[in-house]
Amino acid sequence: LPISQACCCPSGRLRLLAMSASWRDQWIEAVSKIRSDLGYENSAEQLRTLQKTGLLKLTDLKSDPAKFFEAHRLLARHAPQLGPGFWIRFTVHYNLFAGSVLAVGSDEQIKQLDSIQQQGLLGCFGLTEKLAGVNSGGVVNTTADWDDQAKEFVLNSADVGAQKNWISQGLVGDLAVVVADLRIGGKRYGPHAFLMELRRGGKPVPNVEFGDMGRKTVGNDLDNAWIAFNGARLPHSNLLSRYADVQPGNGGSYISKAKGLTNMAMIGQRLFSGRVAVAWAALTFTRKLYEMTREYSDNKTCWGPKGNSNLTSVPQLNNLYARADDRLKKVEAFVGACEKKLCECLVKDEIPPVQLQDAIACAKIVASETSIDLCFRLKQDVGSYALMGDTGFEQMDFLQACKFAEGDSRILMQKLARDRVKSTATVGSSEEQKLAQELQTVLKDGGMQAWDANFDKVYDLAWAVVSRNMEALCPGTLVGIPCGLSKL
């Protein structure tokens, strides 16, 4: 079990032990059969089969989130052999697609998830566009116009920039949660989520166009699509309507069901569970790669003038194993603490408080960047072994996917620094306060140009915020800045 359950969240450890008697063994057995050499259509069939076992329900993110995260961790242990393709396919379906239905769907729409699972239907998540998406703050250019006479929504991609981009599982998915700008009588109401069919009987629905994003360095068992809507029509019931709806008649009227909550804010809840899952995936990949490499180096004989030894005994490699273990334990403890608190929010159906949202962003940054740092260092110290196939090193771009998934590390750090500069509270170390004050001063005269010119200080401030969040939530877990985030 992950170190985190034994450190900052012992109750989480007990929860996993309770479920592990039968479920964990069954899940391990089920995912051990996954292959990455079958092409994306057959890869999708593997997920259909896994889903229909019912071992992990599409509703478990809300009803049993500890199981949801453990399923992600156990699957990620195969990433050094499989690459990122199937893990991404899995989390897109369970977190982004089904999780969005759980977050903003009505009770009737959530009930549909049981039927979707039983039939083995697959879903994708249509948020990102060529010129909009996560990095744009959730702004989308895909439009959904209400046709009051037909009682339908009409989806359109106005231009190439509005086409959905890098949609995982988009070439095989039967269903999609599509985020589009809702318009009623020409008035815009912002991004809303729609649950729609993409294919019926394996064939695309009318007025929806698909294309392949192209070959990748890794993960080619996963299809990534661009999707264009050309007047696709959706029934009124396709709007995920827990927090908002359209009242037909007299041109249609917008109904907000939750004061103070935007529809996009609730859709964005999946970023929090996704960031925790991605953080665990990066750490689990790193643990497994070190485990595989240690097994090799322990058995690799090296000549010496006074007798042979093994590769592990080389001082720098032996020291790296020890330092990496210490660093991983600390980051795992912090991510585990974030998971525990997020699970409490998910079960209670509550929005995570801002402090936890920031901590989760920090967890995703430190987990992915520390993993990239440690795996790169390991690659430098094991010689030609790192060039060999089937060693796990050829799949290291799995960590590149972790770096930019659910919010790129640099973008998240920019947000942390921006929010800290805007704050008037006296918090953090003396260094954090000094950096915040310096940026506040230069911004008064220089505006955004000064922000860009002082980007080193921006990222230094962001790392100070990361460190503060780690120490506040799980004391004793501070780690050094990863090489990928340090100055040249």
Image: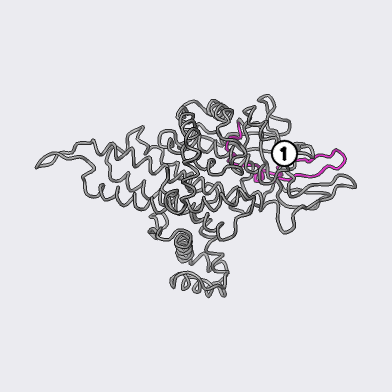
| Residue at (37% x, 37% y) in the render | 392
Q: Vertical placement of 457 versus 98: above or below?
A: below
Magenta span includes 439: no
Where does the magenta region start and end? 142-171
Residue 97 position by quadrant = top right
Q: Which element type, helix, strand or loop, lies under badge 1?
A: helix
Q: Vertical placement of 330 versus 145: above or below?
A: below
In terms of depth relative to the viewer, which is nearer, 304 or 295?
295
- What residue does disc 1 label? 109
Horizontal relation, residue 71 to residue 302: left or right: right
Residue at the far right in the pictured view:
250
Q: Position of residue 247 (x, y in %)?
A: 84, 46
Number of numbered discs visible in the structure rendering: 1
Horizontal relation, residue 330 to residue 382: left or right: right
Q: Position of residue 248 (x, y in %)?
A: 86, 44
Residue 228 position by quadrant = top right
In terms of depth relative to the viewer, which is nearer, 237 or 303?
237
In terms of depth relative to the viewer, which is nearer, 124 or 458?
124
Q: Position of residue 21 (x, y in %)?
A: 47, 35
Quadrant placement of the C terminus = bottom left
Hey, what amino acid is under mark 1?
Answer: Gln
Quadrant placement of the N terminus = top left
| Residue at (65% x, 46% y) in the render | 161
Q: Position of residue 376 (x, y in %)?
A: 36, 47
Horizontal relation, residue 76 to residue 174: left or right: left
Near mark 1 (Cα within 10 A), the count class, few <14, some 14-19 or many ≥20, is some
In terms of depth relative to the viewer, which is nearer, 366 or 326?
326
